[in-house]
Amino acid sequence: GAVVSQHPSRVICKSGTSVKIECRSLDFQATTMFWYRQFPKQSLMLMATSNEGSKATYEQGVEKDKFLINHASLTLSTLTVTSAHPEDSSFYICSAILAPRPYEQYFGPGTRLTVT
Amino acid sequence: QKEVEQNSGPLSVPEGAIASLNCTYSDRGSQSFFWYRQYSGKSPELIMFIYSNGDKEDGRFTAQLNKASQYVSLLIRDSQPSDSATYLCAVNIGNQFYFGTGTSLTVIP
C-alpha cells in the first residue's frame, strides 16, 4: 500500500500559540488529501478536504480561519491550528487518495496535539 | 440520515472463530467500499477494499458486497487476539468518503 507520513507525531503547545502539522504522501502523488480529528473513544470527524492548488473545502462547523490548510504540492498538505486552546487538544489525522479508482484512501499515523 | 451504519458492538469472539462485521449504506451511488482497522491510539489502516458484487478474499479476510441490499461485510477467519481493534467501514462517492462509527472487536484468547 501507499505510505503517508505526518509530522510531528506529538506536540504540546501553550494556549494561544499556533501549531503546524505536515502531511506527506511518500511514494505517490495525491491531488486530494483529507484532514480528520478524532477525540478519545469517538469516531473520525472530517474537518476539510484539501485539493492541490486550490482552497480547502471545510466541513460545517469547522472554522477555516482557525484551521488553516495549505496543499502547495502533490505530496504535501499542511494544517495550522492557530491560536490553539485546550479544547483543540485532539488526535489529528491526515489521509491521501491514491487515484485512479477505486480511490484508495491511506491515512497518516496521526498527530496528538495537547494544548496546555 | 447517516450514509454508513455499523453496529458499534462490542463484538466478542473466541480465538480461532470467525468474526463477522456488517455495514449498510444508504446511497446507491456508492462506488467503492473499504474496511479499515484502527487500534486504540493509532490511525486507521486499510485492510480491504471491494467495488464489485460478490466476495473478495485476502488471507484471513473476506469482504462481501451486495449492492442490491446495500450492505458490505467483513469476515475474519481464525481470529487472533491481535485482531482486537475497531473496524471502520467506509464508502466512496465521487471523491468523498463516508465512514461508519466503527465496530469494536475483541478476540478472547
Image (tube, coloured by chain):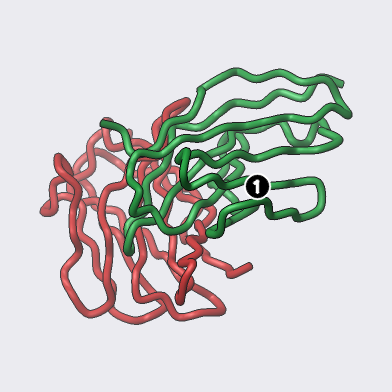
Chain colours: A red, B green
In front of the other: B16 or B22: B22
In front of the other: B22 or B54: B54
Residue A61 drawn at (x, y percent) = 14, 40
Furthest residue to the front? B68
The residue tagged 1 is B63
- Quarter of the image with the C terminus of chain B is top right
Q: Is residue A87 above or below residue B67?
A: above
Question: How busy is the neighbourhood of tag 1: few (under 14 within 10 Å), some, or many (20 plus)?
Answer: many
Residue at x 28%, y 37% (from the top left corner)? A88
Helix or strand or loop: what does disc 1 sit on?
Answer: strand
Residue at x 27%, y 71% (from the top left corner)? A51
Q: Is residue A93 above or below residue B83?
A: below
Residue B75 drawn at (x, y percent) = 71, 38
Q: Quadrant of residue A21?
A: bottom left
Q: Is residue B95 left or right of residue B57?
A: left
- Quarter of the image with the N terminus of chain B is top left
Residue at x 56%, y 37% (from the top left corner)? B41
Q: Quadrant of residue A35?
A: bottom left
Residue A6 drawn at (x, y percent) = 48, 61
Q: Quadrant of residue B79?
A: top right
At label 1, the amino acid type is: Ala
| Total numbered labels placed on residues in the image | 1
Mark 1 belongs to chain: B
Q: Is residue A103 left or right of residue B18?
A: left
Q: Is residue A85 above or below residue A110?
A: above
